[in-house]
Image: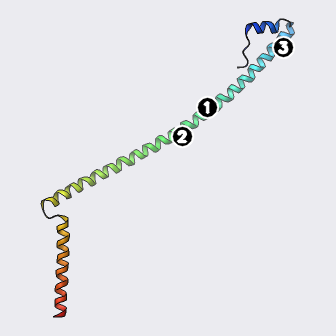
Amino acid sequence: LGPEIKPVDAVTITAGLDNQGVVILQRQIMKEQDEGLEKLEETVISTKHVALTVNEELSLHARLIDSLDDHVEFTGSRMQRAQRMLAKLNNRTKGGCSCLCLVLSVAGIVVLILAILVLIKYL
């Protein structure tokens, strides 16, 4: 809060002063201290505004993270449900005909129908 004055320096400064001079010196020192306190006050107020802004930003980020967490949980539960359904489908196809067999059977039936239609048309 201003320049530090050592006791020896204060004695040296005030040695040649009368009462009026000491009062003037004290007022000057108090004025310098007041100016230092005003600068400190400005710094504290500025720091307070920065802290409030950081707090608002953190609150916003916390809300965004909570929202993201909710979406991740929802998506995770949907994925688990889909995995269970795929597991059931996989178990069903293991016991009987596989999907490939089913597709080939349908393709074979379509080819047979086309062959029959071609034979009927040209005979």
Q: Position of residue 86 (x, y in %)?
A: 23, 56
Disc 1 is placed on an element classified as helix
Work out whether 68 lies above or below 21.
below
Q: Which residue is painted at 68% across and 26% down in the image?
A: 41
Spatial CA distance of label 2 from label 1 is 14 Å
Q: Which residue is painted at 12% across and 62% down in the image?
A: 96
Q: Position of residue 81 (x, y in %)?
A: 27, 52
**98 horizontally vs 50: left or right:** left
The residue singled out by tag 1 in the image is 48
Q: 55 or 92, which lies in front?
A: 92
Q: 11 or 30, which lies in front?
A: 11
Where, by quadrant of the figure, is residue 14 drawn? Answer: top right
Residue farthest along the bottom direction in this orientation: 123
Q: Amino acid at mark 3?
A: Ile
Q: Amino acid at mark 1?
A: Lys
The residue singled out by tag 2 in the image is 57
Q: Which residue is painted at 16% across and 72% down in the image?
A: 105
Q: Could you say which disc has been placed on residue 24 in the image? A: 3
Q: Position of residue 91 (x, y in %)?
A: 17, 56
**Which quarter shows the N terminus?**
top right
